Amino acid sequence: MYRPAHGEPMAWRVARARTEPESGAGGSASGTTEDTALNRTKIRERFACQKVPRGGVVVASSVAHPGRGVIECPAAPALGAGLARDGLRVRYAPLTAHPADRPAPRGGHLLAVSYLERDGRAAGIAAAVHPDDHAAIEAVGDAMRRWEAAMRSRRVLLAATRPACPGARRALEITRDTAGGGQAVVGYGPVTDDPHQAGALTREGVTTVTDLDRLPEGTGVVFPAHGVSLALRAEAAARGLTIIDATCPLVAAAHTEVARFTERGDLTVVIGRSGDAAVSGILGQAPESTVLVESAADVERLRPADPEAISYLVQTGIPIEQATPVVAALRARFPALRGPDPGDFCYHASDRASAVAAVTGASDLLLIAAGAGCPDARHVVRLAEPAGVPAQVVTGVADLCPDRLREAATVALTSARSAPSGLFEQIVTVLSGLGPLSVVNRQVTSDIVTGRARTRA
């Protein structure tokens, strides 16, 4: 049967016709949370219900309760996923609870934990098993105990700065609009690094190539947000391909700056990350007069032909703060250093890092909605490390852990680029079924109000 937490009395209340806790009784046998406001209305009960086959579990999507009316069960998917991992056959359905002192159908043993929201609505978790299926009763009782322990009043802080930058979203829209117009469209490399969006493009007929050799004349080829080299652009034109230029305006501005610096005879130092597609496109504007540096230490290894003729650019897609010490090292070594128009800086990565830091620093746990094996999710974990807050990548509500949530009065939630559609909202929904919930949206947005770009990051 139900295994209590340390110091907790073993008690499933057998529901009678009167089910509300008496005034001052507290309403719960559980001692698993300090949340007095929640415990004041929380009750744990056992009912009869409709028939459930042996070896199976019916997790309630809602419960028709004899005293509380309809109990909504938003956390049902998380409860059911854990039971399925235990090898039980799980299905979801609305259930009707029958008090023990009234005639009721036989065949179902319903365990329920419920509480009242401030507006009087009831919420909770519930599951039904066959009354003689002792293994299932034990498994359900244990799962219910763990999820009940995770019930508390809670805040969710949403790091709402979107994972994909405006340039990437713009490229996706351009590609979809072109494909929707009936034109055959080929992406030069991935148009998006979101696997779900990439799959949608494939279904719309958009294919991907890594060279232009086999494309027939007139084919529409999309240059992605991170841009391409001058040589590739020239090759596409020479082959008679139709160029669909989805290059981010800030990336295009960086390309223009390289051309300007090169024309005046400067060496262009590109501050960025080796292997990033945006870096390849920038270096490809003038391969003979550009060089990549990733750190202040790299600056010491530079040997320009003319120390008076040197300029720098910051790769789009990295936090400006990451480039600052490198720029300082360049200025210290090359006093004549010249830089780009500051109105063309990309602030999206900085904004996202700031948003993650803001919510993580005020939270007990960080949840990251993501696809399995997502590099961007690992990047978000690294962003959160300075706060010393535990982080968990959640690929589905089945990954939510009641033991982690138990002590988390404030949960930070953000998305990686690979997050399946709807997962972010599903996580919030589950948390809303584990006690009164306040959802706070925190977004960091830099607006360039002077300079050429005037681009919302």
Image (cartoon, rainbow, N blue to C red):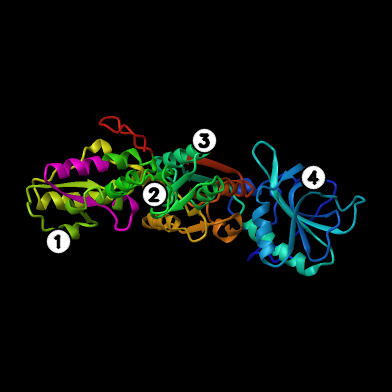
CA distance for labels 3 and 4: 51 Å
Element assignment for label 3: loop
- Please tell me whether residue 412 belongs to the stretch shown in magenta: no
Per the rendered image, the range of residues in magenta is 254-279
Mark 2, residue position:
357
Mark 1 — residue?
Answer: 301
Which residue of the protein is positioned furthest toward the top in this rendering?
Answer: 450
Mark 4 touching mark 1, by CB under 8 A?
no
Give the residue displayed 21% in from the left and 53% down from the top: 287
Image depth: mark 2 or mark 3 in front: 3
Residue on which disc 4 sits: 64
Q: Which residue occupies the foreground of this view, 442 or 32?
A: 442
Q: Quadrant of the N terminus?
A: bottom right
- Dividing the picture into quadrants, the one containing residue 336 is top left
Task: Provide the secondary structure element on which disc 4 rests.
Answer: strand
**Helix, strand or loop under label 1:** loop
Question: Residue 21 vs residue 448: left or right?
Answer: right
Looking at the image, tell me whether mark 3 or mark 1 is earlier in sequence order: 3
Can residue 398 be seen here? The reply is yes
> CB of mark 3 within 8 Å of CB of mark 4?
no
Query: Which numbered disc, 3 or 4, marks the residue closer to the eye?
Result: 3
Which quadrant, please, contains the C terminus? top left
Read off the residue under disc 3: 181
Which label lies toward us, 4 or 1? 1
